Image: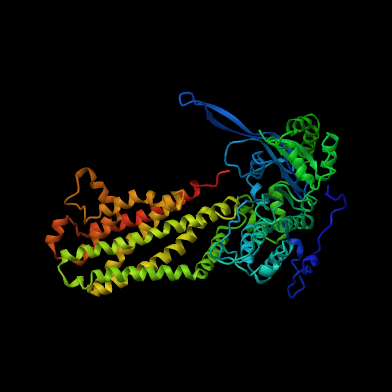
């Protein structure tokens, strides 16, 4: 039912200045506007959703576990195309309920969720979308690029000229619905980069959730932190999308103004201590319900404010317990009947919905059949191509970062090179410290990988949890681009250092080969740290034990001739130790005294072993980084 009681108004694309006649090819065929994957097909129901946590109370001697109920059992049923508001005082569990029915709650919970009368399955995330409180988007992307990125990874269109044109039409339609056409080519921005406003960021985040053809969009406090005008624009955009496409929006919202409240069809009102329902029905009927209970909002300016005053436990004279009891004695039975009717009526499964969407988009069942059963909408190749395109765009636009990166690489090489100016003309024993510094600079400069990985990790976690792409695809792209930038920076540093050292240029190839092999191992080691460390501040502490082990047991400070027998294993796992040995034996193959002094082995077998260890460690560290990125520091809800 609609909040105004009238028949649903279908927004025409002329309302937002768009032509929906459909793009046509020379033969007169048009993909047309019907390619949208959202047609109001999906009803949502849930039964006895509850959540509790275990806390410890009492003295130090008596820390008996105590269960604290956050959500008492809650049920509900929302019809397709409805705008649903979850409202309640702080601490009532609105976001907890939203996370559970959206399938995002990571902590154990109870209850059942049904999509079209069927228990949700692994394809649930393919037909729903979750919009978090934070606007987590790359700052150097434009509004259009952000929305199109989600569309590419949620809707399996091809890449022919006609299909690219159709994708642009769909993206333009969504941008128009959310009032973003005028800023489509502006950067998202952040605290350091000028970009769009906070309200526009919120609408962009909502557009991302909507553009992929979600049947149901869950939005957690999309109006928080916005002005009253921006909040109204944000909800109006959702209302327009709901009416034009039949998408259900389930929204956690705080005390909406009257104009905003009138745009919602359904109200689920909750009280706290613990979270319980006090009203669950049409928004327009809430006033009559409260009046019948003896709490009339007729003389107040904003009924939503009044409802909260009545049911907030911390307000003197509240009627929270009375209204919660009234709900259980009456409306709760009606809600259970609605849930039962949805389950009995059934409907299209997520697989059928996804299959029909693919058919409407012209995707061949032969090529798409396997992917229809998976968590991701598009092929691994499409994920790689889309991620690579975005990563290269972000890298090239961030010219300030590139200038700093390569300037610092040059400066490092210059400082160390001047410190060891013409060291190649001195005794071999005096040159060893230069070789150590050449490798050490590579390791230290790689520490920049940690904050970069941590910064990118937040975006990855949000996008990966929404099923846009796999962890492996993200790691492949990050390795290709990140390692290339790191290797280029290291080459600049090494080239400057070597040119000032006075060493024979005939030795540069061998020296650089072993230094870059060590460098890549350290890049992947710091990626592990970036995946494991909870924050920038803790990344250095996490990195230090392994870094100290590699640097200290480097076959120079501690070598085969001096290492304690019980620590000899450290020389075999230290990538620096293998590189140092190969570089020194390669530069001074006839210096038997030097090799004896440090215990070096210059045999071809040792060279093969060194290469095997370095390659093996590079692969192993990359694999560990992938696993840690997928399993650790996940978003906790």
Q: Position of residue 434 (x, y in %)?
A: 23, 65
Q: How many marks?
A: 0
> Taking 617 as reference, is 580 left or right?
left
The residue at the far right in this view is 6
Q: Quadrant of residue 417?
A: bottom left
Q: How is the image coloured?
A: rainbow
Q: Residue at left 33%, top 68%?
A: 412
Tell me if residue 455 comes above or below residue 305 in the rendering: below
Closest to the observer, 178 or 513 = 178
Closest to the observer, 541 or 80 = 541
Q: Residue at left 74%, top 34%?
A: 318
Tell me if residue 603 comes above or below residue 315 in the rendering: below
Q: Is residue 375 visible?
A: yes
Q: Position of residue 508 (x, y in %)?
A: 27, 71
Q: Position of residue 274 (x, y in %)?
A: 66, 33
The residue at the far left in this view is 593
> Taking 575 as reference, is 215 left or right?
right
Q: Is residue 623 visible?
A: no
Q: Residue at left 31%, top 69%?
A: 413
Q: Quadrant of residue 175?
A: bottom right
The residue at the far front in this view is 316
Q: Position of residue 269 (x, y in %)?
A: 74, 40
Closest to the observer, 500 or 47 = 500
> Split into 4 quadrants, where in the image is the C terminus?
top right
Tell me if residue 210 comes above or below residue 268 in the rendering: below
């Amino acid at each position: 039912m609609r909040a105004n009681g009238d028949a649903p108004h279908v927004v025409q694309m002329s309302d937002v200045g768009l032509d929906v006649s459909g793009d046509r090819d020379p033969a007169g065929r048009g993909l047309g506007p019907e390619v949208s994957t959202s047609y109001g097909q999906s009803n949502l129901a849930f039964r006895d959703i509850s959540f509790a946590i275990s806390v410890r109370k009492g003295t130090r001697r008596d820390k008996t576990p105590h269960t604290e109920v956050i959500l008492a059992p809650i049920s509900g049923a929302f019809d397709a195309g409805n705008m649903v508001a979850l409202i309640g005082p702080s601490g009532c569990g609105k976001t907890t309920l939203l996370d559970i029915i959206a399938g995002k709650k990571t902590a154990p919970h109870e209850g059942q969720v049904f999509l079209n009368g069927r228990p949700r399955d692994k394809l649930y995330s393919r037909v729903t979308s979750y919009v978090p409180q934070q606007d987590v988007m790359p700052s150097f992307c434009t509004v259009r690029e952000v929305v199109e990125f989600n569309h590419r990874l949620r809707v399996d269109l091809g890449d022919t000229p006609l299909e690219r044109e159709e994708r642009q039409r769909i993206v333009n339609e969504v941008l128009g619905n959310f009032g973003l056409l005028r800023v489509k080519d502006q950067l998202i921005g952040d605290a350091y980069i000028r970009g769009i406003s906070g309200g526009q960021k919120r609408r962009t985040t909502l557009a991302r959730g909507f553009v992929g053809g979600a049947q149901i969009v869950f939005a957690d406090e999309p109006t928080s932190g916005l002005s009253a005008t921006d909040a109204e624009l944000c909800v109006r955009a959702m209302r327009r999308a709901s009416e034009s496409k039949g998408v259900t929006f389930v929204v956690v919202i705080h005390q909406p103004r009257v104009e905003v409240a009138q745009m919602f069809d359904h109200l689920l009102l909750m009280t706290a201590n613990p979270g319980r329902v006090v009203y669950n029905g049409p928004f327009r009927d809430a006033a009559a319900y409260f009046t019948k209970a003896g709490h009339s909002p007729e003389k107040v300016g904003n009924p939503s404010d009044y409802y909260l005053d009545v049911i907030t436990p911390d307000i003197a004279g509240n009627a929270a317990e009375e209204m919660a009891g009234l709900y259980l004695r009456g409306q709760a039975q009606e809600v259970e009947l609605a849930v039962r009717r949805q389950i009995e009526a059934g409907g299209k499964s997520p697989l059928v919905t996804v299959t029909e969407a693919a058919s409407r988009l012209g995707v061949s069942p032969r090529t798409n059949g396997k992917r229809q059963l998976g968590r991701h909408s598009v092929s691994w190749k499409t994920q790689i191509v889309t991620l690579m395109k975005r990563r290269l765009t972000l890298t090239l636009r961030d010219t300030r970062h590139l200038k700093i990166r390569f300037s610092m690489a040059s400066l490092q090489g210059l400082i160390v090179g001047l410190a060891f100016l013409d060291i190649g003309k001195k005794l071999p024993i005096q040159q060893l410290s230069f070789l150590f510094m050449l490798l050490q600079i590579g390791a230290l400069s790689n520490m920049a990988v940690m904050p970069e990985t941590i910064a990118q990790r937040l975006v990855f976690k949000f996008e990966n949890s929404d099923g846009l792409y796999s962890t492996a695809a993200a790691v492949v792209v990050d390795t290709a681009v990140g390692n290339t930038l790191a290797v280029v920076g290291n080459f600049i540093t090494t080239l400057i250092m070597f040119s000032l050292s006075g060493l024979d240029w005939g030795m540069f190839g061998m020296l650089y080969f072993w230094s870059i092999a060590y460098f890549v191992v350290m890049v992947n080691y710091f990626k592990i740290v970036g995946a494991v460390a909870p924050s920038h501040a803790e990344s250095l502490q996490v990195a230090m034990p392994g870094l100290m082990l590699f640097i200290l047991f480097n076959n120079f400070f501690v070598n085969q001739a001096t290492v304690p027998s019980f620590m000899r294993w450290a020389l075999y796992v230290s990538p620096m130790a293998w590189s140092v040995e190969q570089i020194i034996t390669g530069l001074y193959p006839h210096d038997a005294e030097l090799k004896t002094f440090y215990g070096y082995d210059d045999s071809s077998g040792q060279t093969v072993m060194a290469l095997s260890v370095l390659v093996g460690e590079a692969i192993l560290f990359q694999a560990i980084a992938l696993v840690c990125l997928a399993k650790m520091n996940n978003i906790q809800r």
